[in-house]
Amino acid sequence: MLKRIVQLFFIIVGGILGALYLPELLELLNIDNIPFLNKPYTLAILGAIILFITTFWLIDYIVGLIKWLEEALIKAPVTDVLFGSLGLIFGLIVAFLIVIPLDRIGFVVVNTVVPIFVTVLLGYLGFQVGFKKRDELVSLFSINRIGKKKGAEEEETNSKAKQLKILDTSVIIDGRVADICQTGFLEGTIVIPRFVLEELQHIADSSDVLKRNRGRRGLDILNRIQKELSIKVDIYEGDFEDIQEVDSKLVKLAQLTSGVVVTNDFNLNKVCELQNVAVLNINDLANAVKPVVLPGEELNVQVIKDGKEHNQGVAYLDDGTMIVVEEGRDYIGKRIDVLVTSVLQTSAGRMIFAKPKLLEKAL
């Protein structure tokens, strides 16, 4: 069907060209006195036949090009096609406005060549700008609609944009973010980017059992946040195709929307700080709400395993804080009273050093 349409197009164009230009060609060849060649419809038919025969080899290439273009447009995301088309239309409008004054200039080159060049150039530039800036434009039309309201003052707009909490993959899999949202400590709108969902689905489809379970746990956590909690959840549909890493995409999205990245990834935390992006680390919150333990306090713990140093034992509090018990190797598997000797705060959390209270009494 497509091939027939292309052939019909060439036949119509050939007929029009034959009717317009064949009389002049016949006059130059001094054969315009033939009776049947003086008829316009005869010249149109002749022109259609000539163009159809001369371009017969070209039709298959044109049909292949059209089909390739059709497949490319079908496979392309809707945002790419939409914003590329809008950019092309805008470029053609600007070209039209520029070409209008050129018609008044008497030079043939300016009247013919320059308008074509300007139209092609601005149409191309408009398409490229619309296509390559689609992520920023999507952010303007989607995320700004989520976090901002029309008519608000600038400070109020910025404060509402700060309410956007962008979740990364690690904090979703961790699961504690759902409990934090339930308690009300995490306010505003939860934004889950589409590329984070794709990474989470990829993990859930992994052949590794551990990764597959972690991915499915993350999807369950998202379902719980969406269905059971009252907090607002929005899916960000945009993507940054020129950026490969998901963490870099999160940072870029946070920069565009003035949002806050919620994570428990130490490296992502540092990257956000270096790029002046607001970040909330679940591990920092967990460390902040751990009970304060001072040297000299008495604790009742169960020694679980050996420590790294000689004759050390290791125990844990209910919140997971590690307690290194000096001279505690002999008490592995037993519950004993210990006295806190020092507390060390590290990037991994709080570590407590203690010694058995029985040993203290013996001394």
Image (tube, rainbow, N blue to C red):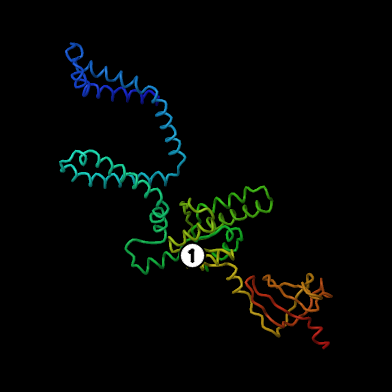
Residue type, numbered disc 1:
Val
Q: Nearer the viewer, residue 294 or 33?
A: 33
Residue 300 versus residue 267: which sits nearer the camera?
267
- Looking at the rendered image, the quarter that the C terminus falls into is bottom right
Task: Pick whichever, 145 or 168, lies toward us.
Answer: 168
Q: Where residue 7 sits: x, y (%)?
A: 35, 23
59 is higher (above) or lower (below) than 36: below
Q: Is residue 183 visible?
A: no
- 129 above or below 274? above
Image coordinates of residue 356 in percent, x first then y, are 79, 81
Residue 299 can be seen in this image? yes
The residue depicted at 16 percent of the width and 13 percent of the height is: 33
Work out whether 171 lies above or below 123.
below
Residue behind mark 1: 260
Element assignment for label 1:
strand
- Residue 272, placed above or below residue 86: below
Residue 293 quadrant = bottom right
Task: Where is residue 315? Give x, y as percent.
Answer: 75, 73
Residue found 34% across the figure and 47% down from its top: 125
Left/right of residue 237 with respect to residue 337 in the rendered view: left
Which image quarter holds the N terminus? top left
| Crowd class of label 1 (few under 14; some 14 to 19; many from 20; radius 10 Å) | many
Residue 348 on image: x %, y %: 64, 70
Task: Give the number of callouts.
Answer: 1
Which residue occupies the extreme bottom position in the image? 363
Residue most extreme to the front: 29
Q: Residue furthest top?
A: 35
